[in-house]
Image (tube, rainbow, N blue to C red):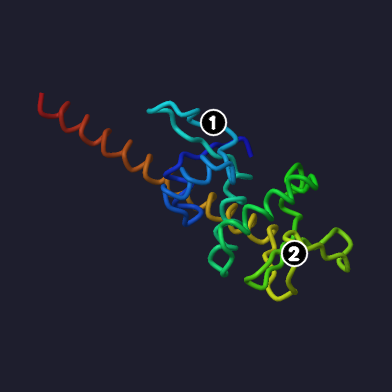
Amino acid sequence: MDQSFTAEQACRLTNCTHHQLRYWDRVGLVKPSVQTTGGRPGVRRLYSFRDLVALRVVRSLLDNGMSLQRVRRAWDYLRREGEMDDHLAEVKLVTDGQTIFHVGSDEGELMDALRTGQLAFFVAIDEIAREVEEDVSRFELDRSRFLDMLRRVEDDIGEERAAGS
């Protein structure tokens, strides 16, 4: 997808707050890959589809009891292992609320991203990616309908003005 999403759209599509997006950008957890502010006021953050998936994954881990510090450590581990590159949607994470495990491409391979803990909860990034894609499609459809409605209203106003002249 060659789309970009504003911070407001990213919040709506991922259930993250503006504060979370700003903070996660500032600390380097999930940075908008299309455009960052670079610390300049008035510059919009623009997120890619992959960024939306990453935001949802982080949010899911936090919602399931992981601390932000542990999520950051696991995310750093995935970056170091090259898992965040081209195949993010294929990554599977498992957590018990204490640690985060990475399920390797060989389903029997389980790596402790924080070095301790046991298996209990799966976060399947490919499922989250599909959910984000569905939400983006609904968002695009809603936006398209809204713009069509605005065009019709503008046409009606133009016709009324022309009739009144």
Q: Residue at x 51, y 54 (%)?
A: 14
Q: Quick one: quadrant of the C terminus? A: top left
Q: Residue at x 37, y 44 (%)?
A: 146
- Marks 1 and 2, Cα distance to the nearest angstrom? 31 Å
Horizontal and vertical percent position of residue 45: 48, 35
Is residue 148 shown left or right of residue 95? left
Q: As shown in the figure, which amino acid type bears the numbered disc 1?
A: Gln
Is residue 138 shown left or right of residue 28? left
Q: Counting other residues with Cα less than 10 Å from the Cα at mark 2, is it few (<14), some (14-19), or many (20 or more)?
A: many
Dot in front, 1 or 2:
2
Horizontal and vertical percent position of residue 91: 75, 56
Q: Secondary structure at mark 1?
A: loop
Residue under pointer 1: 35
Question: Which of the 4 image quarters holds residue 51?
Answer: top right
Residue extending furthest left?
A: 164
Residue 144 vs 90, above or below: the answer is above
Residue 10 vs 156, above or below: the answer is below
Q: Quick one: quadrant of the N terminus? A: top right
Q: Counting other residues with Cα less than 10 Å from the Cα at mark 1, is it few (<14), some (14-19), or many (20 or more)?
A: some
Horizontal and vertical percent position of residue 142: 43, 49
In terms of depth relative to the viewer, which is nearer, 145 or 4?
4
Residue extending furthest top?
A: 165
Horizontal and vertical percent position of residue 133: 60, 52
Q: As shown in the figure, which amino acid type bears the numbered disc 2?
A: Phe
Is residue 106 shown left or right of residue 17? right
